[in-house]
Image (cartoon, grey):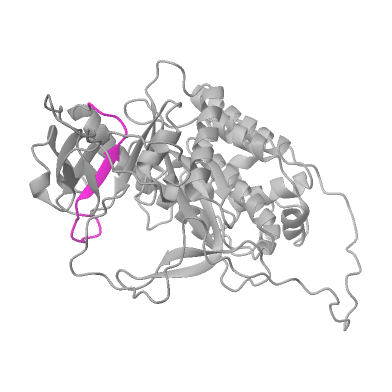
Amino acid sequence: MRQLEDRSRAAVISLPDASNRRANGELSRFRRRVYESLNRRADALFELADAVLCADGPVRSVAELSLAGEHRRGYGSGYAALARGSMDVPRLQTALSAAPIPRAADGRLVLAVDVTCWLRPEAHTCPQRILCHTYGRGKDQHMMVPGWPYSVVVALESGRGSWTAPLDAVRLAPGDNAASVTARQIRGVVDRLVAAGHWRPGDPDILLVADAGYDGPRLAHVLADLPITVLVRMRTDRVLHRPVPPQPPGTLGRPRRHGDEFAFGDPATWGHPDVVTETTTRLYGPALVRAWDRLHPRLTHRIAWAGHDGTLPIIEGTVIRLEVHRLPSGAIPKPVWLWHSRIGLDATEVDLAWQAFLRRFDIEHTFRMLKQTLGWTTPKLRSPEAADRWTWLQLTAYTQLRLARDLTADLRRPWEKPRQARRLTPARVRRGFRNLRPQLACPAGVPKPSRPGPGRPAGTPNQRPASRHDVHTFTSTNKPKPKHRKNTKSSNPRPRRPG
C-alpha cells in the first residue's frame, strides 16, 4: 500500500506545469498534423520517424531502426515505406509553418537559406544526380562530387544556442536555376507564415539572411512585393557604385546612371562611412562596424539578369563592413562585407543586421545534426522521390525535438556539464524523447499480421537489372570551367565590377 502511495505521489510531483501542458499539447497537435499529411504507408512512415527520435545513438541504418521498441514493424518496412509510400508535401509545409516560430531579439522573424548536398558518388543507378561543390581536406581546395543538392530554409532564433526551425526543403533538379528556385521557395515560406499569423501588417519586415553564393540585389528585386528585407554577404573583390551626383546645368549628353566606384579592396574609394559602431562580443572580442548608405551594383544582362526586359534597375542598399579581433577557431579573422537591401539605417539597425548574419551559421549546426545524428544521408535510396520523403521525415523529427526542448529531462553523461532546460542541445533533447513519447499522441495503427513474400528463388539471376544514369555535370548556376583554362589564382586579381 505504501508503494502505491509513493508511486502516486511521484506521479503528482512529475506533472508538468501550465506552460509544459501547452507545449505538450502543441507537440501532440503537430504529430497529428504530420500523420494526416502521410497518405500511402502512413503508419510505417510515422513509426520510422519515431524510431529516429528514440533510437540509441546516431542512426546508422534504416533496418536497425526496427530494433527500437517504438518501431513495431519488420526491418524491411522502412525501405519499403520510403520507396512506395507517399505524403502530402503542401500539408507538411503548412504544419511546419503553423508550429511556434522563434524570433530575433527585436521581435522580427529571421530566415536563413542555404544549400546542402546529399552526396551519392557511387550510386550509378540513381537518377538526377548533380556535381555538388564540396570542400577538400587542404586549404582553398574543393571537389565536385555527385549527389542531390537541397535548398533548406530555416527560421533563426536569438540567444546562445544552435537551434533553428526548418520550414522548407527543395531538391535542385538538373537544369534548375538556383536563384529562381530560391525566390519561389522564399515566396512560398513567407506566404505560409503570413497565413499562419506569424506576421501581421505593422510588424517589422522579415529578414532573409544568405551567404555570398546568393545574389542579394536579385532577391531583393524579385521579392520586392513581400514584407521581407534581404541581407547577404558579398565577396571581398566586389565593386559597387554611389548615386549619381546632380548634373550641372547646361551639361550635354546622356545622364550618368552610376556614380563613383566603391571597391571593397581599395580603401581609397570608401570615403567617410555614414554609420560607425564599436562593441565587444563574447566570442569575437572587439568588433568595429562601418556602414555606407545608398550603394548599388552595376547590373548586366547576364546570369540572373539575362532574361530581364528593358533597362536594368538601380537597386540601392547599405554596405556593412564587419571587423572582429579573433575567431573561436583561432584563425586570423578577415573582414566581412554585407549588403542590406534597405537604405537609411541607423546605428541600432546596423548592429542588429550584422548580429543576425552571425546567427546564420546556426543552419550549419542543423545540417550537422541531421546528417551525423539523425542519419539524413545514411540510407542508400535509389530514387530521388524516396530521398525527398526521407528528407521531410527528418525535418518533422527535428521540429519535434525543438517543440520538446522544455519537456524532456537532461539525461547527461557523467562527463558532461549540467545545462538548463532552455540550454539543452538537440542531441541531449533526443536522449529524453523516448520517455516523453508515451505522453504524446501516437496516431499510427498497430501492424496487421502478414507473411513475407516468396521473393526471387535462390540461384535465379536477376532478369531486370536497374538502369544506370549519367551524372549531370552542371546546372544553370554551376557550369564547369573550360578545360583549356588553368585553375590558378592571379597574383593581381581584378575587382568584380558586374553585378
Q: In percent of the image, x 9 and y 40: which residue is there?
A: 271
Q: Quadrant of the N terminus?
A: top right
Q: In percent of the image, x 31 and y 42: which residue is there?
A: 357
Position of residue 80 measured from the top left corner of the image (x, y, whole percent): 77, 58
Per the rendered image, the range of residues in magenta is 327-344
Position of residue 280 measured from the top left corner of the image (x, y, whole percent): 15, 41
Task: Please say whether residue 407 is visible from this viewpoint.
Answer: no
Q: Nearer the viewer, residue 107 or 202?
A: 202
Q: Quadrant of residue 195?
A: top right
**Magenta stretch: helix, strand or loop mostly:** loop
Q: Quadrant of residue 76?
A: bottom right
Q: Nearer the viewer, residue 257 or 77?
A: 257
Q: Is residue 451 magenta?
A: no
Q: Quadrant of residue 328?
A: bottom left
The relative height of residue 484 versus residue 96 in the rendered view (above or below) is: below
Q: Is residue 253 left or right of residue 20?
A: left
The relative height of residue 470 versus residue 194 in the rendered view (above or below) is: below
Task: Please say whether residue 446 is visible from this viewpoint.
Answer: yes
Position of residue 218 measured from the top left corner of the image (x, y, whole percent): 40, 40
Q: Quick one: which residue is furthest to the top in this view?
A: 202
Q: Nearer the viewer, residue 394 or 86?
A: 86
The relative height of residue 441 versus residue 324 in the rendered view (above or below) is: above
Q: Nearer the viewer, residue 210 or 109?
A: 210
Q: In percent of the image, x 35 and y 34: which residue is there?
A: 313
Q: Is residue 206 left or right of residue 283?
A: right
Q: Is residue 33 left or right of residue 242?
A: right
Position of residue 496 measured from the top left corner of the image (x, y, whole percent): 26, 54
Q: Is residue 335 magenta?
A: yes
Number of numbered tags placed on the structure image: 0
